[in-house]
Amino acid sequence: MSENDTTSPAGAAEQAAATAGRIRSEIGKALVGQADVLEQVLIGLFAAGHVLIEGVPGLGKTLLVRALARTFDGRFQRIQFTPDLMPNDVTGHVMFDMNSNQFRVRRGPVFTNLLLADEINRAPAKTQAALLEVMQEQQVTLEGKGMPVPLPFMVLATQNPIEQEGTYPLPEAQLDRFLLKILIGYPSEAHERELVRCVTGGQVGDSLDVSAIETLVKPGAVREIQAVAAGLRVDEKVNEYAVNIARATRDWPGITLGAGPRGGIALIRCARSAALLAGRDFVIPDDVKAVALPALRHRIQLSPELELEGQTPDQVLEGLLERVEAPRT
Amino acid sequence: MELDRITTAVRPRSPWEAIDLGLHLARRWWREILIPWLLAVPALAAAVFYLLADWPLAAIMVFWLLKPLYDRIPLFILSRALFGAAPGWRETLAALPGLLGRDLPWTMLHRIDFIRAFNLPVRQLEGLRGRACHQRLQLLQRRARGHATALTFLFMGLEGVVMLSLFWLVPLLLPREINEDLIEQTFFLAIQGDVFPWVLGGLYVVAVVLLEPLYVAAGFSLYLNRRTLLEAWDIELSFRRLARRLAAGALALAVLGIGGAGLPQSALADGPPTRPEVHPQRRPFTPEESKAVIQAVLGAPEFDARREIKEWRYTGGEDRDDAGFDGFDFALGKFFARFAELVLWIGLGVALVLLMLHREKWLRIFRSQPPPAPPAAPQNLFGLDIRPESLPDDVPESARALWRQGRQREAMSLLYRGALAALVHRQGIAFSSGHTENDCLRILRPLVSGDLYAHFRRLTRAWQQAAYAHRPPEEAQALSLCDSWHEHYGGAS
């Protein structure tokens, strides 16, 4: 049994957990029926990661991002990825200003706190790579000069699972950069009824209304929460559990390509964030198990037989989680 | 036929052994066979292909049809060589016209015959025709037909193998630089319309030249073996040897002037030729006496060899529906019937093998589904030993003692472990090793009373804090968990 040295004072953790909880309930006012998605997006935010959201259009992804940006007064940008989108359209470019006889930097939409990269798989690989580089480095290099993006910085990329014609699927190495892959589905009937009532009630058109969302904190607070989350205690056994899960994917029947070490890292980062959202200042195995599906589903590759049988990575991972021994210290 | 001069060891053999002997015969007299064979068959093939140069496929067909004709050459040589009179190649060539010309139409009539190699000696050596031949064949084939058919199919396959091997031999032997293109070119050239029949014909002639003597020899050997069994050649040979030995003995006795009568009994004994005992005073047996002696001999324990054999015998009347059929149509119909039977047997065999291999799947259908036995209670969960005997008699008391010693974490561990053991072994709750603490709570909720669930929940929370946050619960909370432990999980665990 060993301890993590970077334990945060219990008070700070408590406060951070309370703020995180308030942010969650605030967004819940605008986003109806997607509690799991919201939870996972917040886990991604507090773990300082980026998320890939997969789902058909019109399920409230933009609303979620706008509401999230509003709660912490963050900047929000959206890029619709298209086949003719160039890397400069994402990162920005340097242009010569005739009036001042100087080069001027025009920053791209990537200089923001929350970036919604809509249908990321519609842009060619070069443009995708430009964005993924920013995600990794958290800075843009223009004319040889590194320009950091404002923090907290989070990319929420979406992709549509059905229209595969004319898309550029993200390669495995780039999928690995996303901390979580979140599946967004249709809301339940009750939630959908409520949603329709909310959106149409006294509203012109179908624009998304996030005016009801209050700004709770400043962007700096989000960074503090991230710091607190990063410092939550993780017992050695919990760490071992996460590593065991990641390792089990490598020789599990039906999985041709398992998760790399980044899988285990992602599990622990997300588990810390999940523990914080649950109001705890320590991580338990349940946190790891709860985030295992979104953290690993894009890091494994199923064997062709299972894919032909219509099995999903989630089904295989669920079977795996049943078999990996949970720790009891 | 002078059986005494036979050059092989005559004894009943299994059919496969007989085929093996045939191949050995062909190897033994390969020189005698090879020269006339190489002179006759390629010449015949050349003649056929020359005459039918415009229809090479027809030439192949004719060459194939003529097989029984030139098969006579190796049979002629072998049948003589077997009795110690192997003909030289000149002798064989001299015999060729008579050999090939004889009964050509009759031979051709029986061309479609899947036990040709076996039947050939009957037609060629015994010279039988018509009904006599048919009856003789029926008798001989009775227990050899399967093997003779298998032999034919085997050699058909071998012909294919030899042809394919020869086809690829040329490209394989060429240097690698020119090889790849040439293989393609050879292949395309060879399968083009004009050249293909000639390539095929050439390969076929080579395959026949190589294999046919072996085939004929194997069939001949099968035939010999069948006759050995039917006509007891081995016994006949033994008797002949015996007679020779006795004749020599009798001559010696006559020379010595000692008259003797009757065959001495000891001479029947199987042993080295010894001088027979002779009783000059004994008079010859009368027939009655002979009978009595024979009965006495047969009554001896050596002759009392009894075996109990059980077999199916057809006890109904004669039911022959093939009476009145004869000739080619009959043979063809029979062949197809045989072939269909073979296919069905093979199918049955394959089906049996498949059933055997997949028995796990289909046996399940017949197995009455027993009520699933309750899974044996695990002894080890999540790395915790939860066997009742691994726990102290009084769990809460031991936990309290640990707590007092300042080992709070161990105290909580013991309480939690004891509770899990009680739930698994007493309440029969099925936890698996993949279940986390909260999973256990979720599973437990619908299965146990609210009080027990609430207690286990408090215990789980306290344990999680102690284990993962390294923060033991308040002393009061821990002691209250100890106090109420027995109430929920029973007495001794």
Image (cartoon, coloured by chain):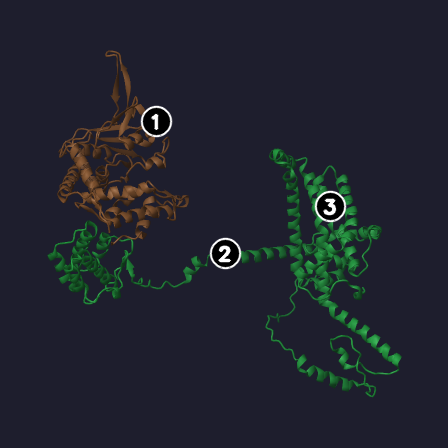
- List x then y, in percent, for residue B385: 27, 60
Residue placed most toward the observer, B212 or B90: B90
Front of the two marks 1 and 2: 1
Instruction: Specify few, some or many for label 3: CA neighbours under 10 Å numbering under 14, 14-19, or 20 or more.
Output: many
- List x then y, in percent, for residue A303: 40, 44
Find residue B276 and report its image quarter. bottom right
Q: Residue at x 22, y 61 (%)?
A: B418
Q: Quadrant of the N terminus of chain B?
A: bottom right
Q: Are marks 3 and 1 on the same chain?
A: no
Query: Given the image, what chain letter belongs to the residue carrying mark 2?
Result: B
- Check disc 1 and give the amino acid type: Pro
Q: Are marks 3 and 2 on the same chain?
A: yes
Instruction: Specify few, some or many for label 1: CA neighbours under 10 Å numbering under 14, 14-19, or 20 or more.
Output: some
- Check disc 2 and give the amino acid type: Leu
Residue marked by disc 2: B354
Q: What chain is the green one?
A: B
Q: Is residue B222 left or right of residue A219?
A: right
Residue marked by disc 1: A83
Residue A32 appears in the figure: yes
Query: Given the image, what chain letter belongs to the residue carrying mark 1?
Result: A
Residue marked by disc 3: B63
Query: Given the image, what chain letter belongs to the residue carrying mark 3?
Result: B
Find residue B289 and report its image quarter. bottom right
Q: Is residue A188 above or below residue B245?
A: above
Name the element at disc 1.
loop
